[in-house]
Image (cartoon, rainbow, N blue to C red):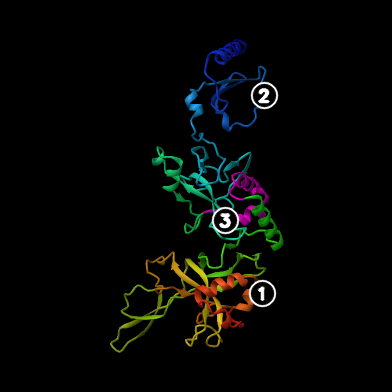
Amino acid sequence: MLQRVSNALHRSLQNARFSGPPISTRALGIFLTHGVDRVYSLNTVSTPQKKRGLGSIQLLRPMSSSAVQRDVPRRGSRTVSNLDPKRLNMSDIVDLNGPVQPSVRFGASGLQLDYHWPNTPFPPNSKGFLYYYCRPGLPAGTGEIRFRVVGSRSASYSSGDRFANGRDLLDHTGHRPWRIHMLQLYTTRDYDPIRRLLLSNGLIDAARDRETEQRVSVSNVKSAGGSTILDTISDTFVIQLPALHLRFAFIHDECIVLPASSVAHKVHWRDRIETVEGSNARWRVYQGAMNEEGVRLTRRVFIFLGAAVVRFELKKAEKNNTFYRLKEGEVVLVLRILELLDPMDPDGVPYRLLEGGELVQGTSPNWSWCTSLDRAQRLGIITPSSLKILEELYLGKNASGGTTVTKCPSS
């Protein structure tokens, strides 16, 4: 019986070979293995154990020539041939749903992508374009790979329109774009396929590639994945408060630095103390004494728990004792909170951040966090080029001559 079936299939194959349209090797097929029918998708099946002989017979279902020539992504395919957002094709759309670490081919080689290490899969509907993002004018080592999610409703649009109308996938925090930074590409050999594709696409040239590799090698940046990477000292970034340690990788014009020790430790932000009359007020507080009318006072004082947008700034010490043991006019590096991304506590009570932001606080709840400029330079947080950026932003163009280097006990 098996022999008769095999002969029939052999005749069908010959007829299809000479009389039918061209058959795509990526089309759906039917595998007969020892007389048992099984349906597979050929583009997801690795090399069969046997291609000839009675043990395994393969019959391909013919496809129309228009279906073969149409430039659309195959179901289950994750192949990226282009990372230039200005030259994307529909075939560059990849679907990262499903496995914890989906395999993606970049050109001729593949690798597995992580959403959030170790076992967090990409969110549902993670279908779109992987692309290269880099701001002009920044030094070698900056830039990143992002993922632009495109909606299924835009299927009739061109690839350019779908990209323009999409949105960048956020990371597991939900507050910043998911990314693979260039420092990770140059410190992790697994990302070499992406690096080669960037070169072949002309997104980075050979000189830029060599310069980045040299800068990374000299800086001895072995792994920047667990640090907040700043492409420039003036960038805003997201941190969780309170934080025991804050670790960074700084990309300066002169060099790339991953400080050996944490830049800051035991930092937090505490909302201002406020006295409110009435025992029914919903404050994260402790109950205080009663006033003259016998109404209990509630004091509002608590530490913020959540994500915040912050940035480094230079600030001159003032008379208001914001910093511990600093003379008026001395300049230090501070962290300013610009936005609270978790503005409500679990009870629905809002945190109150002053307009213009407030400074992150240090180990003592009564003092703002700061670090001296000599410590910042010693750790590589700032260099001459980045100090100039901060001075122009926060102290004025002629401030460099009057900058005072001082030690700060709260660093």
Are the residues at dot 3 and dot 2 in contact (C-beta closer than 8 Å)? no
Q: What element carries label 2?
A: loop
User: Is 200 contained in the magenta span?
Assistant: yes
Please tell me whether the stretch drawn in magenta is mainly helix, strand or loop.
helix
Q: What element carries label 1?
A: helix
Counting from the top left corner in percent of width and height, residue 99 is at 55, 43
Quadrant of image for the N terminus? top right
Q: Give the range drawn in magenta.
A: 178-204
Q: Name the residue under label 1.
A: 378
Which disc number belongs to residue 50?
2
Quadrant of image for the C terminus? bottom right
Res 265 seen here: no
Q: How far apart are marks 1 and 3 (CA)?
A: 26 Å
Q: How far apart are marks 3 and 2 (CA)?
A: 46 Å
Quadrant for residue 78, please give it.
top right
| Label 2 vs label 1, nearer the camera | 1
| Label 3 vs label 2, nearer the camera | 3
Q: N-terminal of the two: label 2 or label 1? A: 2
Are the residues at dot 2 and dot 1 in contact (C-beta closer than 8 Å)? no
Q: What element carries label 3?
A: loop
Are the residues at dot 1 and dot 3 in contact (C-beta closer than 8 Å)? no
Q: Distance between the residues labelled 2 and 1?
A: 64 Å
| Label 1 vs label 3, nearer the camera | 3
The amino acid on which the numbered mark 1 sits, given as a three-letter code, is Arg
Which disc number belongs to residue 361?
none
Residue in the picture at 59% in, 83% down = 404
Q: Name the residue under label 3.
A: 143
Q: Is residue 372 above or below residue 260?
A: below
